[in-house]
Image: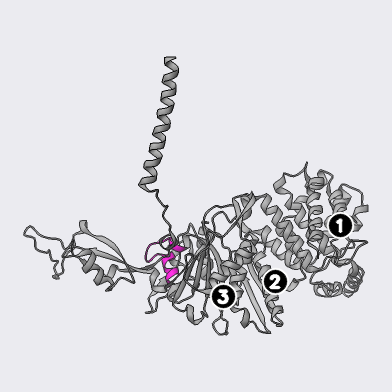
Amino acid sequence: MDAHLLNTIANFIWGIADDCLRDVYVRGKYRDVILPMTVIRRLDAVLEDTKQQVLDMKKVLDGAGITNQWGALCNAAGQAFCNASPFCLRDLTGRSAGQKLKADFEAYLDGFSPNVQEILEKFKFRNQIATMVEADILGAVIQKFVSRDVNLSPRPCGDLPGLDNHAMGTLFEELVRRFNEANNEEAGEHWTPRDVVELMADLVFAPIADQIKDATYSCYDGACGTGGMLTVAQDRLNAIAAQSGKKVSIHLFGQEINPETYAIAKADMMLKGDGEEALHIAFGSTLSSDQHATRTFDFMLANPPYGKSWKTDADRMATGKKKEIVDTRFNAATRDGAPLSMIPRSSDGQLLFLLNNISKMKQDTPLGSRIVEVHNGSSLFTGDAGSGESNARRYMIENDLVEAIIALPEKMFYNTGIGTYIWVLSNRKEARRQGKIQLIDATGIKTPLRKNMGEKNCELSPEQRREIVRIFMDFEESEVSRIFPNSEFGYWKVSVQQPLLDAQGNPVLDKKGRIQPDKEKSDTEIVPFGYEGGIEGFMENEVRPYAPGAYIDPKATKIGYELSFTKYFYKPVQLRSMEEIVADLRALEQETDGMLAEILGGIQG
């Protein structure tokens, strides 16, 4: 559908809020009415043509004493949903106002099938009815949505063309975007800017585009918010398949903990005709109540919450004692079989979402699985050697899952100005990437916005997204692309001890003849994996020249992993030369001398 027409419809619906809700709701609450009413009107319009068939079927079922009716009624409607009330939404515009309209509208809502009821429940839409009735605006809102000036039906109406499922989905997503940007203090909670989502979809599919076959694929988002990443991924895969003449189907799966955004995700899929896909969107916490525990997926994308406590989940998983969490998603083993706990601090659970995705990677397919997630900098370096965060990085890197990490420009998101990073993972690395990680500094690749949207002051143009993907695909070193062996990011944290000496300068021994350490001289050192000679070489070169008797406590040695973009891409500010500074000082001196002479001359006069 023409973008101008879609924008016109979006403006009309957006205008309903100002026309009807302005004196009743604060601006931030308009969405509580407009979004569910948009869903209701679209479903209502889709069901209008088969309304009589549904009512006839209900009469037959009632007469036969059949209570489990929804399957048959949906079949009669020809949709994955239906409404068995005697009303269409348009019927209610002729009702009197007040309690009669309220009763009929509630009866109309009660007629929807369970899958729609769940959406209305999560929207908490029924809570708004009393407010609208009390303010005498319910009739006006209904009248606006069934107006002949706007057509949300899949069929043409007068001079207005019909909206197919894809166009309706696009319209709904535009409304969600507008409300999120209007409430930008909340937007980053569950809304990833579309330019970032588009880049993430490119990074998922571009490396394997020529390997797509006539097949069925699955895509998953464990922090799916309003479902935008899933729908963009679906569109991208379909476009890639069409270009190569392949026929694919893609099943979407997700989980979301916020009730309203969960409702939006389900509603968006239902509005697009993806009723079956809507069933795959689960409600609840992915961390403590994984609703897709037995599934694996071909592609996974996510923007998990970062800097957000997951203590509530920890309490549910192991009575608040993190060390008792035995979930296999977050506990692994080293190559020598030692336990490897990857449980991070309770103040930030973003790495758990990445580990959750890794646990859902396919192991027995040619493509395996590809994961793209956006995190803040904490996932790169937070946590000491042996901590849950460091162990998570160790697990990913030692299993050679990380293809690349891309630093995005600051102020890319609506509610935060901090730096963000896209992680790209695969368990089917191409040969040239095996054993290596590519770091891409894309912080300078951006287009300024003419007007800030919350904290967001820049975006990625289509050309800039293509450039970032090109850098990734070329896999070559440059000013903005560095490639390292996995071992570059690992280190040993060692405990350096010195002997406790007696008054004669001799080492003090315990009862078993072992040298006692001088606790006041204990220290720790960080030894990179790449240090020549390893730990012993480090001790000989860096420690024993200053403490000849120093030794390592091998039981205290821990392995850590961290990544630092600053280390590899930091560009120091170019200082001015001494000549430039002196020249400026002399010029300033001459200027002040002239001013002083002028002042003194004025006094003498």
> Colour scheme used in the picture?
one colour
| Residue at mark 1 | 150
Pick the residue in front: 494 or 289: 494
N-terminal of the pair, mark 3 or mark 2, is: 2
User: Is 213 above or below relative to 417?
Assistant: below
Which class describes the residues within 10 Å of circle 2: few (<14), some (14-19), or many (20+)? some
- Could you say whether the residue bearing mark 2 is in a helix, strand or loop? helix
Q: Residue 214's image quarter?
A: bottom right
What range is drawn magenta here?
Answer: 380-394
Residue beneath the point at 62% across and 49% down: 454
The numbered disc on residue 263 is none
Q: Amino acid at mark 3?
A: Arg
- In the rendered image, the quadrant that contains the N terminus is bottom right
Pick the residue in front: 56 or 68: 56
Q: Is residue 184 visible?
A: yes
Residue 405 in percent (x, y) is at 50, 67
The number of discs equals 3
N-terminal of the pair, mark 3 or mark 1, is: 1
The numbered disc on residue 235 is 2
Q: Is residue 159 magenta?
A: no
> Disc 3, disc 1: CB below 8 Å?
no
Pick the residue in front: 586 or 203: 586
Horizontally, residue 158 falls left or right of residue 212, namely right
Most frequent secondary structure within the magenta stretch: helix
Residue placed furthest toward the top: 605
Separation (CA) of disc 1 from disc 2: 26 Å
Residue 159 in percent (x, y) is at 92, 61
Q: Amino acid at mark 1?
A: Val
Residue beneath the point at 60% across and 52% down: 457
Residue 404 in percent (x, y) is at 50, 70
| Residue at mark 3 | 370
